[in-house]
Image (spheres, grey):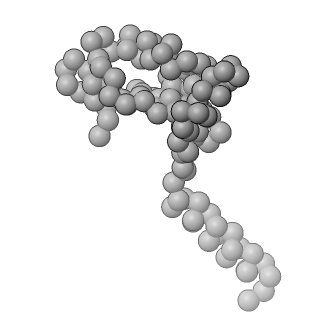
Amino acid sequence: MNRFTLCCSALAASLSLALVIPASARDLDQDEALRLREKGIIQPLETLLQNALGRHPGARLLEAELEEEDDILVYEIELLTSDGVVREIELDASSGKILKDEEDD
């Protein structure tokens, strides 16, 4: 096998693994979240939660997590709407921008 063929085979194998392995998110614990909030890197969850609840009046908070996804700090929030539907909302923890708002599976 010549060098070119070997390099192409290695590249193809690497790309196929990249397509199979999903991007991972790292959960941050409460100490990390507090440190980031004190440094002004992220907004308080309470502030962003009010925005999320405003989109779904009468909803109740089920779960909230701070994660790092692709170098972006994201609050992942699950709400139970007044209709009994679970919504998964992802918010950029720094800007407050809503990244995702959809029914949870």
Is residue 24 visible in the rendered structure shown here?
A: yes
- Residue closer to the observer: 77 or 35: 35
Q: List x then y, in percent, for residue 8.
A: 71, 73
When the figure is inspected, residue 54 is found, relative to residue 43, above or below; the finding is: above
Q: List x then y, in percent, for residue 35.
A: 65, 28
Q: Residue at x 63, y 22 (%)?
A: 37
Q: List x then y, in percent, for residue 44.
A: 55, 18
* 36 sits to left or right of 24: right
Q: Residue at x 53, y 42 (%)?
A: 27
Q: Quadrant of residue 3?
A: bottom right
Which residue is outermost to the right? 3
* 53 sits to left or right of 12: left
Which residue is outermost to the bottom? 1
- Residue closer to the observer: 54 or 31: 31
Q: Residue at x 19, y 25 (%)?
A: 84
Where's the C terminus, which quadrant?
Answer: top left
Q: Quadrant of residue 29?
A: top right
Is residue 102 visible in the rendered structure shown here?
A: no
Q: List x then y, in percent, for residue 22.
A: 51, 54
Q: Residue at x 64, y 67 (%)?
A: 14
Where's the N terminus, which quadrant?
Answer: bottom right
